[in-house]
Each structure stands twice: as structure tokens, then as C-alpha cells.
């Protein structure tokens, strides 16, 4: 039985790449299961996350020019090459299942070249804002959305990460399966005077609100630090750094870059903070829970509320309310006993999302043999 993961690359840091590695490593341990990861632009770079040596890697060498529009002449030509190479490969491989975890050009043609394979699309981004945009869309945009819905109706399954996102699937093929997380023996040091936030430094992560909240926090807690981890995206980091300098908080807020050992890093902090505009099912919250790191997050659509048990292992804050975010941070920073209570509950509650629990749902969906 052959399972193919179909994606753009596996050399960058990211939730999709990390989750895919976890799933691929799990599947390849099952009896009589072969796993292949097919990429379009790996560019001879090594995988970012550890992969079982039994997994086969195939790169189609399409190499889209990401600085240009998908619909530029250059990328349209590459899309034609992509289609031909992918169709020929699937015809040769004849996989039992094709799992496509991101949105690429091939989203629109995969249902029509899959042969007899079970075809599964995973949605790792929230469609909350798209749902709102549909209500006021122009005629041409409505045509685009209708094409998208028609295409997705031809997938065997649309896997979404939480029940709220299932409501945005316009076809009856939605299945809810959360992201998995490996169990950890690490415990966060909740006595540290440090707060951590992590993710791609982009507008959607809204770290700017966390910077604003910290200006209110540091008045009472001048000896506490906020550390932000992640890679820069479209110059967002420079904007945030300028704001930090302008508010004279360069001794309180530090940008730490990306790391490959996030759990080891997290254990040196006492609180995790999230201020995103939208999240589907953030892996970073699962990682925080796995080391017992108390969490404070905006109740943004729609991921955090499907991970954090409010008041039990963390706190949800009114979305886009900087003052409330600062208030909750200060409250938790004052109270070591409360951090200890949240930590114990987080370690227990993360068991809902362990690889063993989540992958049982995938085995059933793909009708695979159990270990």
C-alpha cells in the first residue's frame, strides 16, 4: 500500500512541514505501507524535520518563481510542466492515497489526474476571513469561489483541523482531524521571568499587538523579558523592531530568529503568548502544552479555542483587545501557583492530541492496517 504526500517543499520551518513529517514517519512504520513525499521545489535542500530513511523523496523540479504572481507567464509555463510531470508520476506510482496538505496550482487539477487513488486535501489555514469576503464578493470573485467549491467537491475528503473550520467547507466531504504532537518528558521552568511567542513574523501573526501589550506590562514587570522566535516575512520584523526602539523597549523585547529545537527552547520560559489575527490549529500551542507551558492567547478564529481549555490550561483573551491581553499577562506573571496549576493541566490535556490518538483517525480514514 503506497501513500503519497504531495507538497511544494519540505526544507523550510513550518507547521505544515512539521506535521507532514510526523504523519509520514508514523505511516511508514505500519505493515506493508510505503510512503513517498513528492515536492515541486525542494532545490536539492535537505528536509527540515527528521524523516524515517524508509521514506522516498521525489522532487519534480518545477521551481515556481514565488516573487511573481501565479498567473505570470513564467509561472503558467511552469504549471504546465508541473501538470505533465505530476500526472506521469501518479500514473506510474498508482498510490492508494494522495494527501495534499497545502494550496498550490495543482489544487485545481489533482482530482482529475488521481486515477483510482483516494485523494485528500488538508486545510491548514483558516477560511474565516474568506467566509466573510464571500458575502460581499464581486461577480468575478463569486465565479472564483464557485470554481473552488466545485473542485473541492471532487476530492474524496477535505480534512480540516477543527469543527469550526468544517462549517466553511461547502461540500459534504469534510472530516475533522486535528494536528498531532509527540509526547515530551520536558517541563517548562515556570519560575523564569520570560515570556515566549513564536511563529512566522508576518502580519497575520500580529506580533505588533504583543509589543503594544508589553508596553503596559513592563511598567509593573520591568525585569521580565519577551522573546519572539521565527523567520521574517516581507519585512515585518524591521517594522516591529522599529516600534520596539520607538517605545524604548529594546532591553525588554528580543527577536531570536528561528530554531529547530523549539521544545528545548520553550522549557526556559514560564508563559506562552499568542496575538494572531487568525489561526487554524497552531502547532506552537500544542508544543507549549506538551512541555506544560501556561498559555495566553487571543480568542482568534478558530484554532486557539479548540486547543486551550479556557481557565484550565491557559486563558483566552478577547480578540484584538490589547489591554485585556496585557491584563491577563500581568495576572499570570504575578501568580506562580496559578502557573503551576495550568502547567499540570496542560500536560494532562495535551494527551488528546498525541500522535497515537490522532493517527488512529488517519488509519481509519485511509483504511490502513493497525500496528
Image (tube, rainbow, N blue to C red):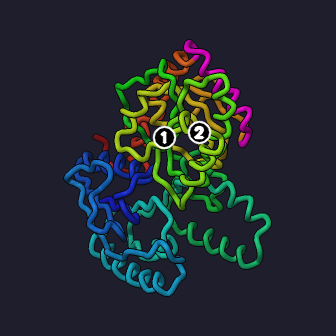
Q: Is residue 103 above or below residue 254?
A: below
Residue 141, how many percent across, how many down? 71, 74
Q: Residue sitting at 44 percent across and 76 percent down?
A: 65
Q: Residues within 10 Å of mark 2 (few under 14, many from 20)?
A: many
User: Circles 2 and 1: CB distance less than 8 Å?
Assistant: yes
Residue 314, how many percent across, how many down? 59, 27
Please check the rendered image and state whether residue 327 is part of the magenta-colored stretch, yes or no.
Answer: yes
- Magenta stretch, residue numbers: 320-338
Q: Residue sitting at 36 percent across and 76 percent down?
A: 62
Residue 282, how many percent across, how many down? 52, 44
- Front residue (pair 187, 120): 187
User: Is residue 285 visible to us here?
Assistant: no
Quarter of the figure with the N terminus: bottom left
- Extreme residue in the left direction: 53
Please check the rendered image and state whether residue 61 is part of the magenta-colored stretch, yes or no.
Answer: no
Asked if residue 106 lies left or right of residue 58, the reply is: right
Q: SS of the residue at dot 2?
A: strand
Q: Residue sitting at 61 percent across and 54 percent down?
A: 203
What is the chief secondary structure element of the magenta stretch?
Answer: helix
Q: Nearer the viewer, mark 2 or mark 1?
A: 2
Quarter of the figure with the C terminus: top left
Q: SS of the residue at dot 1?
A: helix
Q: Residue sitting at 25 percent across and 45 percent down?
A: 29
- Front residue (pair 127, 227): 227
Residue ID for mark 1: 284
- Extreme residue in the right direction: 136
Q: CA distance from mark 2 to mark 1?
A: 9 Å
Q: Is residue 49 above or below residue 247?
A: below
Asked if residue 201 lies left or right of residue 5, the reply is: right
Residue ID for mark 2: 274
Amino acid at each position: 500500500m503506497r501513500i503519497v504526500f504531495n507538497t511544494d517543499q519540505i526544507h523550510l520551518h513550518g507547521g505544515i512541514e512539521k506535521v507532514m513529517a510526523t504523519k509520514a514517519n508514523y505511516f511508514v512504520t505500519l505493515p506493508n505501507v510505503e510512503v513517498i513525499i513528492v515536492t515541486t521545489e525542494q532545490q536539492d535542500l535537505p528536509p527540515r524535520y527528521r524523516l524515517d530513511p524508509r521514506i522516498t523523496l521525489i522532487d519534480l523540479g518545477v521551481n515556481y518563481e514565488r516573487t511573481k504572481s501565479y498567473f505570470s507567464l513564467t509561472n503558467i509555463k511552469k504549471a504546465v510542466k508541473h501538470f505533465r510531470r505530476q500526472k506521469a508520476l501518479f500514473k506510474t506510482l498508482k498510490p492508494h492515497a494522495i494527501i495534499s496538505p497545502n494550496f498550490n496550482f495543482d489544487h485545481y487539477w489533482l482530482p482529475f489526474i488521481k486515477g483510482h487513488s483516494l485523494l485528500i486535501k488538508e486545510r491548514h489555514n483558516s477560511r474565516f476571513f474568506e467566509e466573510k469576503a464571500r458575502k460581499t464578493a464581486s461577480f468575478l470573485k463569486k465565479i472564483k469561489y464557485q470554481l473552488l467549491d466545485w473542485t473541492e467537491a471532487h476530492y474524496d475528503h477535505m480534512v480540516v483541523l477543527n469543527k469550526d473550520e468544517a462549517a466553511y467547507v461547502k461540500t459534504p466531504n469534510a472530516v475533522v482531524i486535528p494536528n498531532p504532537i509527540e509526547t515530551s518528558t520536558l517541563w517548562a521552568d515556570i519560575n523564569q521571568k520570560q515570556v515566549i511567542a513564536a511563529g512566522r513574523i508576518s502580519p497575520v501573526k500580529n506580533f505588533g499587538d504583543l509589543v503594544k501589550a508589553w508596553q503596559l506590562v513592563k511598567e509593573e514587570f520591568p525585569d521580565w523579558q519577551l522573546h519572539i522566535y521565527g523567520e521574517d516575512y516581507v519585512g515585518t520584523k524591521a517594522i516591529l523592531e522599529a516600534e520596539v526602539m520607538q517605545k524604548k523597549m529594546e532591553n525588554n523585547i528580543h527577536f531570536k530568529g528561528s530554531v529547530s529545537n523549539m521544545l528545548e527552547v520553550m522549557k526556559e520560559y514560564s508563559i506562552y503568548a499568542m496575538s494572531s489575527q487568525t489561526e487554524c490549529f497552531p502547532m506552537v500551542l500544542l508544543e507549549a502544552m506538551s512541555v506544560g507551558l501556561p498559555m495566553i492567547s487571543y480568542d482568534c478564529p478558530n484554532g486557539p479555542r479548540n486547543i486551550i481549555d479556557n481557565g484550565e490550561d491557559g486563558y483566552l483573551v478577547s480578540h484584538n483587545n490589547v489591554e485585556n491581553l496585557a491584563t491577563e499577562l500581568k495576572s499570570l506573571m504575578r501568580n506562580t501557583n496559578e502557573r503551576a496549576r495550568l502547567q499540570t493541566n496542560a500536560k494532562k490535556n495535551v494527551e488528546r492530541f498525541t500522535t497515537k490518538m490522532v493517527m488512529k483517525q488517519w488509519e481509519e480514514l485511509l483504511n490502513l492496517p493497525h500496528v
